[in-house]
Amino acid sequence: MVWTKFLRWLFLTATGALGAVLLLVAAVDPYGNLGTGWHRDRVMLDVNQRFMYPQITRSHEFDAAIIGTSTSRLMPPAPFDAAFGARFAALAMNSATAWEQYRIADLFLEENPGARGLVIGLDVVWCDRDAQAGDTTKRGFPDWLYDDSRLDDFQYLLNMKAIEISGRYFGYLVGRETPRYGADGYGVFTPPEGEYDLERARGHIWGAGPRTIVAADPPVLPDAAERAGWQFPALAWIEELFGRLPADAARVLAFVPVHVAKQPRPASRDAAVEAECKARVADIARRTGAVLVDYRFASPLTGTDENFWDPLHVRLPIAERLARDIAAMATGGPAAADARILYRPN
Amino acid sequence: MRPVAWRAGGTLVGMLFQSQIFLLVFMPIVLGLYHLAARRAVLREWLLIAASLVFYGWWDPRFLPLIAGQALASWALAYLARESYAVHLVRLGILANLAILGIFKYFNFFSDTIASLTGAELDRISVVLPIGISFYTFQIVSYLADLRRGRAPLYSMRRFLLYILLFPQLIAGPIVRHNEIMGQFDGNPHGPGAAEAFARGAVLFVIGLAKKVLLADPLAAMADPVFQTATTAAPAFGAAWLGLAAFTLQIFLDFSAYSEMAIGLGRMMGLRFPDNFDQPYRSLSVREFWRRWHMTLSRFLRDYLYVPLGGSREGTRRYLVATFTTMGLCGLWHGAGWTYVVWGLYHGAGLVVCRGWEARGRTLPKLVAWGLTLVFVMFGWVLFRAADFSAVVTMLTGLAGLGSAAVAVEGATLLVPAALVSLVGVSPQAMVERWLKPHPVFAVATAAVFVYCVLVVGKGQPVSFIYFQF
């Protein structure tokens, strides 16, 4: 009898604890995917956007989206909202591969078939010649949050992290936790402007110390046949996404600025590859009726250390200017300073 | 052997004991149905066979025809061998089973070896190594060998299938002998002491689960980068020793944990599997180590290889041949590579030296004997774990303090609890059998550890990176 009682304690404790965890997770719905939460707050309580953004696409509160990596995350949606008369969600994700960006855009278009715009902040990942479907990072990519089935999601919710994020929600209710970014996905991840330290930024940008960027000598000039042989597999995904947008929706492609220290050395093979990639993107813009603007070249913007926190991330006022300027160029305005319009439909 | 994908980048994705699908779905359903069918022997045996096939097929359904075919064909040969004129069929069965193991596990090893010796270009085959094939093939072979010696009866087909397929010990042991388990299948799972057996089994299972999830897996994350570095450069002194210490503890905790989970599962079904590990790192000699490490394999090799080869009773030469043959094959059984063979021979040499020392009646202070044994075993793990011989050399270079490659080894404090669990007290089996009392506190603690482990192994957890350092 004593052992039967022992077993009863064991089973009741285990099932009780697991049941409590399930109840907690279902009640808080930390990724906003279950639809079982008692609240309708959409609070972004984890820094991993891959897990947080699917609920934004499913909220149906937005009819347009900005995707990209962290290099596009500081651009606020408001100027795009105003320019296109739409409600943009900020769905750019830190260190996202082109495939991951495609996945969130794909989900967005699936959930919001009448979408009115898609802005893609382009950087080097789209020109990766080895990009392939399924590329993810060590941060984990929750395929289960991107599929059509919500029932199977429970198998991914019995873990410490789901409990932790659920717990943060209670912290949020009592004012001890702040959302990591807004309900539209937008968040400023750079420190306050007052804390900007140029010397520190230069350390990030240049490492050992500022240097003069000189062109490769002799210049690498691949011939047309060689260039034609280069593949940029991710670019096809852009065409596919734009093809699914309604005809009158805004299609905007922008090579976002990174510091010249991070750009390919002029006249190098990498520079030739990047130029070819840009040309291919321009072809896609032509075929899909998209606007393509380019900030990714040596310019006063990309050559000034003071504009950057590190070689990839501009300061907030610059990012806000970028959003305004890109929106203006996409709606017929003149080329902004430090930008080129590579293609714009008539 | 590959206990549970201990190698870095292991691609095993089957239903591991420490997966939620096993812990929360498969195990409760199977145990529930088994105990519902407890009073009907035939039904519960078929149920276990079916469950084992599901378990095994979960790894890769393509493995099912092989294991089922090996088991059924071996049983059929045993059946035919009832007639004395057909006894030679049993030998055929042994050879065929070993040949299957040879093809699936060792074809490329032999092919590569011959190619490197002769310079010939030989074909390699591209097959997936069926999980657990080394374990179940040994069980089949041991049965057929006993049958040939007249020491085993002919079992019913159902019983024999159950013996080979029984899922708790199918993947990574313990290697169970037919005569220690077959009779148990007749026992009543709800007989006297059933609740106690279930409880002790459950606690042992949870101890194994915790060892695997909370100790062995994090230790792997410490050891892997060090051995990875050793494939290209000698790790710095501290990193090399930390990595080796981590792997020494990992391989024991991982492998013994899997055995404990298997034994615990058996106990929950009223079955007793033999013990497999008895705190081997407390050994005072290499001989004692092999009496405490993977005991069911040592026993198998002793009875089916070492003794038939002459053992220690037919002169020194026979003893040396028997020892080195047995230990060389023991190494090969663990993995299809020369590093494993050399690891086995290294232990063979250790056994020979140890025997010679003992035969002269010499002794060492206990602490010295323990230290020497442990260091000997640890250097053996370098051979066992390193990717190839050049990695062995670079790792040894690092251990000698002649390396400089920096490796970030994080979480070294984990070595302390891992060492305590490995060195202090008795084995978990002994602990559970001797000391566990039916007090609710132990029940609640066991449940809490179980739930914690379930949550730790949960899939789909976002990884947060410290990314921006402005």
Image: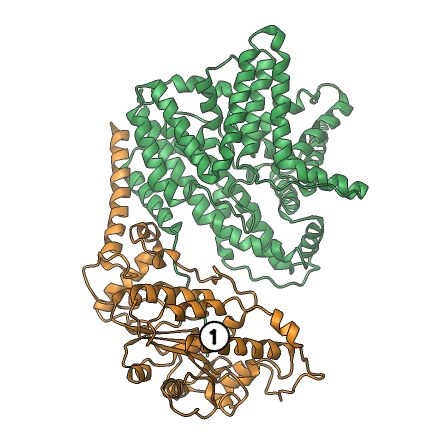
Which quadrant is home to the N terminus of chain A?
top left
Q: Within 10 Å of the Cα at label 1, are there few (<14), some (14-19), or many (20+) other Cα atoms?
A: many
- State the residue at coordinates (60%, 79%): A271
Q: Which amino acid does label 1 sit on?
A: Ile
Q: Position of residue B113 (x, y in %)?
A: 74, 40
Residue at the disc numbered 1: A284
Tell me: B306 left or right of A167: right
* Observer-nearest of A255 and B113: A255
Q: In which quarter of the image is the C terminus of chain A?
A: bottom left
**Dot 1 falls on which chain?**
A
The answer to which quarter of the image holds residue A64 is: bottom left
Q: Is residue B351 left or right of residue A20?
A: right
- The image shows residue B36 at horizontal and vertical percentages of 28, 26
Instruction: Work out which residue is located at the far right of the displayed protein and give it.
Output: B118
Chain coloured orange here: A
Residue lying at the far left in this picture: please name it.
Answer: A38
Judging from the image, the colouring scheme is by chain
Numbered circles on residues, count: 1
Where on the picture, by quarter, is residue B96?
Answer: top right
What colour has chain B?
Answer: green
Q: Which of A283 and B177 is in front in this view?
A: A283
At which x and y percent is residue A27? 22, 56
